[in-house]
Image (cartoon, rainbow, N blue to C red):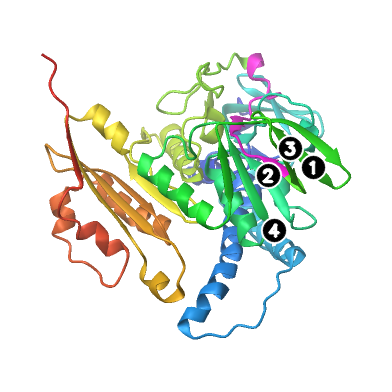
Amino acid sequence: MAEFDVDLFVIGGGSGGVRAARIAAGYGARVTIAEEYRMGGTCVIRGCVPKKLFVIGSHFRHELEDAAGFGWTVPPASFDWPTLIANKDKEIARLEAAYTANVEKSGAQIVKSRAVIEDKHTIRLLENDRKITARYILIATGGAPNHGASIPGIEHVISSNEAFHLARLPKRIVIQGGGYIALEFAGIFAGFGSDVTVIYRGDNILRGFDEDVRVHVRAEMEKQGITILTGCTVSKVDRHGDEFTTHLSNGSSIASEQVMFAIGRHPAVANLGLENAGVAINPANGGIAVDHFSRSSVDSIYAIGDVTHRFNLTPVAIREGHAFADTVFGKREVKVDHANIPTAVFSQPEVGTVGLTETEARAQFSHVDIYKTSFRPIKATMSGRDTRVLMKLVVDGSTDRVLGCHIVGDAAAEITQAVAIAVKMKATKADFDATIALHPTAAEELVTMRTPTARHVRQAAE
């Protein structure tokens, strides 16, 4: 009789957990994966995928407006929110079915239940109060929206989860937050015709991004009619039937039909039974504390993805899940390299970035060269739209290595994915310069900027 019921028990059917389960099963492991909600996790069900579909849908308003400059006469268009929701739901259901099928094809078993850890090798399924023993347990429960400190009327506030299922498009919406989700939904709702106000506590949006990116994105969003109020927070939300009054810390108030908070996410570690096995929490970020191999403080329990609160990006969770399976069941140690991870904000305009910001580079390197350009894209010369693209390279002035690339504009994410390969390979500015431009494109600016727009030299301490 086997010592354990399964070799691996995965808690969480999101992208990271599914990848780990499939790869481990491919190595011959007996795998069970538990998911209490829907297979696919945050990214597929209520995150990246439906959000990108909404972003694409909201772009059509701009496309229709821009068409006139190219000779098109477009009859007055109308938009139907319920149709968007229904078609989105259909696509998400298809993806969920694909995730389920792929796991089952790998030989892993799926159980639809919440799973709680009883001890370092035992899981209890709440659906039928059944216990399963496992040689290894992998926690991949992701994260959840965090509304922050409790305020009067917090029960009236929605998160991005509910935004995907609203019965109707709000004419006016207040969004608190200045990061990925807040700005992406600001662009989405504005694109569909809503009046949008963004509230952020800091001095400017996109904290942690390059300063030029932050300034450029804000200016572009404000050109589109989105109101951005910084240096204040929501202190109270009153409801009046189907409408709300949002009170701000600066004493002002805003009327709207919806109030959404997107101020961050916290690791989904509650009620998992972590204390039963002695799994340690990282006090710095509230996630499960893990080493370079995603191993927790308990040798039989691992954790990957957003539940560790390291780099909360779906591709990172997938890479960590794959590395875990390779290391534990493939018998070859694989560490995930978390350096130079490309990321995108699907705001409007779009942001793509990889590597160091100018501020980070100047703190780490004595000589930093900046190559920056801002220009009107070719499409805008005909459409008449008031918009500009930003492109910026951060270079080590001593070695000529490209340390960072920051782009704001159409297809920024697509361009950045390719540039990330060069940055990961430690390409130099000379390598960029030696690459013949692809004309006419916006991306050609990355290989035609020859003269630094700024040079920073840090004097050695005497």
Q: CA distance from mark 2 to mark 4?
A: 29 Å
Residue 244, labelled with which disc?
1
Residue 246, labelled with which disc?
3
Q: Amino acid at mark 4?
A: Ala
What residue lies at 54% left-to-right and 23% top-to-bottom? Answer: 288
Q: Amino acid at mark 3?
A: Thr
What residue lies at 21% left-to-right and 66% top-to-bottom? Answer: 437
Q: Position of residue 256 (x, y in %)?
A: 75, 47
* Sequence order check, earlier mark of 2 and 4: 4
Tag 3–tag 2 contact (CB < 8 Å): yes
Please identify the quarter of the rendering in which residue 115 is found: top right
Q: Position of residue 66 (x, y in %)?
A: 51, 74
Q: Which residues are magenta?
A: 259-276
Specify whether 300 is left or right of 195. left
Q: Which residue is mark 2?
A: 174
Tag 1–tag 3 contact (CB < 8 Å): yes
Residue found at the very far front of the displayed protein:
251
Helix, strand or loop under label 2: strand
Please identify the quarter of the rendering in which residue 94 is found: bottom right
Specify whether 222 is left or right of 46. left
Q: CA distance from mark 1 to mark 3?
A: 6 Å
* Sequence order check, earlier mark of 1 and 2: 2
Tag 1–tag 2 contact (CB < 8 Å): yes
Query: Is 354 inside the magenta-drawn segment?
Result: no
Q: Amino acid at mark 1?
A: Phe
Q: Amino acid at mark 2?
A: Val
Helix, strand or loop under label 1: strand
Nearer-the-camera pick, 454 or 446:
454
Q: Which residue is mark 4?
A: 93
